[in-house]
Amino acid sequence: MQKRTTSFLVSISILLALSLPMYTHAITIEGVGATLYPGNAAVENTTTKTIQLVLGLMGLIAVAIILYGVYIKLKARGNAIKVRSAKKIISTAIVGLIVILISWTIVTFVIGTTTVEYH
């Protein structure tokens, strides 16, 4: 019974983590086509959308790795080596997520302050 409950909770967590960026509009399905095929869009807009898409996907991967580390820790059942390995996975993924968020902030700031509007 405990194995089914753990499996169910991990499945729900992964589903929520994968759908979270769409709910917060960090990654929109409609914007993917416009990003990959910009047409007549300005270079700044295309670059911004592409960088945001890539960083959003990297953030999603980092969250998935955190969930994987949590799953490993749940499956360890007190085994010190597996618990230590899971903590290392989780801490590394959290550092990666922080780096991604900082780079997202820097890119958004730099592009926002250096973009020139043409009339």
Image: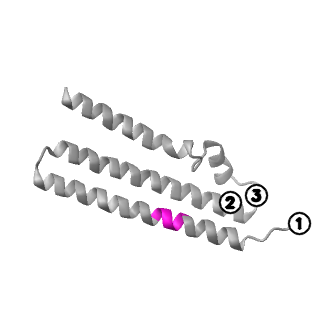
| Distance Cα–Cα, label 1 vs label 2 | 19 Å
- Could you say where residue 89 lies in the image, as x and y percent from the top left? 27, 57
User: What kind of secondary structure does the magenta stretch mostly adopt?
Assistant: helix
- Badge 3 is on which residue? 41
Quadrant in which residue 53 is drawn: bottom right
- Could you say where residue 65 lies in the image, as x and y percent from the top left? 34, 52
**Is 101 a magenta residue?**
yes
Q: Earlier in the sequence, mark 1 or mark 2?
A: 2
Q: Are marks 3 and 2 in contact (CB under 8 Å)?
A: yes
Tell me which residue sits at (69%, 72%) in the image. Answer: 113
- Badge 1 is on which residue? 119
Q: Label 3 crowding class (10 Å Cα cut-off): few <14, some 14-19, many 20+?
A: few
- Observer-side mark, 1 or 2, equals 1
Q: Quadrant of the C terminus?
A: bottom right
Q: Which mark is residue 46?
A: 2
Q: What amino acid does circle 1 point to? A: His
Outermost residue toward the right in this view: 119
Q: Which residues are magenta?
A: 100-104
